[in-house]
């Protein structure tokens, strides 16, 4: 049985329902979006994160089709909500690439995109599971979503024992509110630590592998992920602990890290205590250079960062 959050976006006859991740794990509240504009606002407001915006965008496009809206404009609205992760662009492209722009055609494209994402996640998880030793003590950062869920499934299918340590991931606490409870729900041996403790655990020899998702991977092997990944990767590299980054495919539109727009959110989010004369700064993502990454794991297998461009030697990735 997969945890509830694996299906956190649902299309109904007249709306898209999005599980509000800001309120997990203590509350289960579904945000009802009746228009594509409301879906876009939910994505921008962090109602859903990680792969959640991908599914929200797919079904937001269905709402636009039902309302007879311009699909190109609707797609651009969704893409503009969060620009660092390219999930939104892929979801929109998946729908717009269909020749049938009827409601039925858009719905079929969205459903196909949904299943394609899940099948690719299973493939990359199987490749990642093969890299982890039996008894692996895994450190993860932020919320890897379906990649992480499928990795747990793949490790169990491989008959391997494992445990996870999760960073809390300030300021939205995705690790504390999403990753750790989901792993616990799946019966995984799970430990939660603050963001500042990961380096100490690696240095003490308590971590066998650092495993995270990647919001985007450039064609030259840079890994873009939740801010804090870079520091953990640097520590892992210093102590010769492998860092495996999970992504379905490198992004052909970003040849290098200079091409990636880094999202900055409100600095107020980091101020637990608002003190006069103090301002907050919140870069939501950071970029880990290839020299600090051991493996980039895709749905076509594992690649060294310097070789990740060869992913496309098998042909273009279907969106």
Image (tube, rainbow, N blue to C red):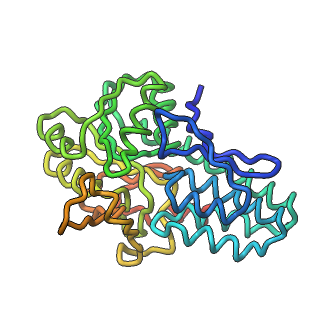
Give coordinates of residue 14: x percent, y percent: 80, 51
Image quarter of the C terminus: bottom right
In the displayed structure image, the side of residue 83 where residue 31 appears, left or right: right
Q: Nearer the viewer, residue 165 or 238?
A: 165
The residue sitting at 39% across, 62% down in the picture is: 307
Observer-nearest of 118 and 30: 30
Question: In the figure, 311 relative to 233: above or below?
Answer: below
Which of the 4 image quadrants contains residue 204? top left
Can the viewer see residue 318 in this picture? Answer: no
Picture quadrant where residue 223 is located: bottom left
Give the total of numbered labels.
0
Q: Is residue 241 left or right of residue 151?
A: left
Asked if residue 167 can be seen in this view, the reply is: yes
Give whichever of 85, 274 is nearer the camera: 274
| Residue in the picture at 32% in, 62% down | 268
Picture coordinates of residue 28 (x, y %)?
Answer: 56, 35
Q: Residue at x 77, y 75 (%)?
A: 70
Nearer to us in this view, 317 or 149: 149
Residue 262's x, y, as percent?
38, 70
| Residue 17 image offset from top left, x and y in percent | 68, 47
Say whether residue 112 is left or right of residue 140: right
Q: Is residue 90 above or below residue 73?
A: above
Residue sitting at 63 percent across and 52 percent down? 55
Extreme-front residue of the structure: 276
């Amino acid at each position: 049985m997969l945890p509830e959050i694996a299906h956190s976006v649902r299309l109904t006859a007249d709306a898209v329902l999005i599980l509000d991740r800001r309120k997990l794990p203590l509350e289960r509240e579904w945000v009802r979006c009746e228009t594509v504009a409301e879906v876009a606002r939910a994505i921008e407001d962090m109602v859903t994160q990680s792969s959640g915006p991908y599914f929200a965008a797919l079904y937001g496009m269905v709402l636009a089709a039902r309302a007879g809206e311009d699909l190109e404009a609707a797609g651009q609205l969704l893409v503009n909500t969060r620009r660092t992760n390219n999930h939104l662009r892929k979801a929109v492209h998946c729908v717009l690439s269909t020749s049938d722009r009827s409601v039925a055609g858009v719905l079929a494209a969205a459903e196909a995109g949904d299943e394609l994402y899940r099948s690719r996640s299973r493939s990359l998880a199987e490749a990642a599971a093969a890299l982890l030793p039996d008894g692996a003590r895994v450190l993860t950062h932020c919320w890897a979503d379906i990649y992480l869920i499928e990795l747990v499934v793949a490790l169990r299918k491989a008959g391997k024992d494992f445990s996870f340590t999760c960073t809390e991931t300030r300021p939205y606490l995705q690790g504390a509110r999403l990753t750790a409870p989901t792993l616990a729900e799946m019966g995984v041996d799970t430990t939660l630590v603050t963001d500042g403790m990961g380096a100490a655990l690696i240095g003490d020899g308590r971590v066998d592998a650092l495993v995270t998702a990647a919001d985007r991977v450039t064609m030259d092997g840079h890994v873009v992920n939740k801010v804090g990944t870079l520091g953990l990767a640097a520590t892992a590299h210093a102590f010769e602990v492998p860092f495996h980054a999970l992504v379905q495919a490198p992004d052909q539109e970003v040849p290098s890290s200079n091409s990636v727009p880094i999202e900055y959110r409100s600095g107020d989010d980091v101020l637990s205590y608002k003190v006069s004369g103090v301002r907050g700064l919140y870069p939501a993502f950071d970029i880990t250079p290839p020299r600090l990454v051991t493996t980039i794991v895709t749905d076509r297998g594992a690649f060294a960062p310097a070789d990740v461009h060869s992913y496309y030697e098998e042909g273009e990735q279907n969106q």
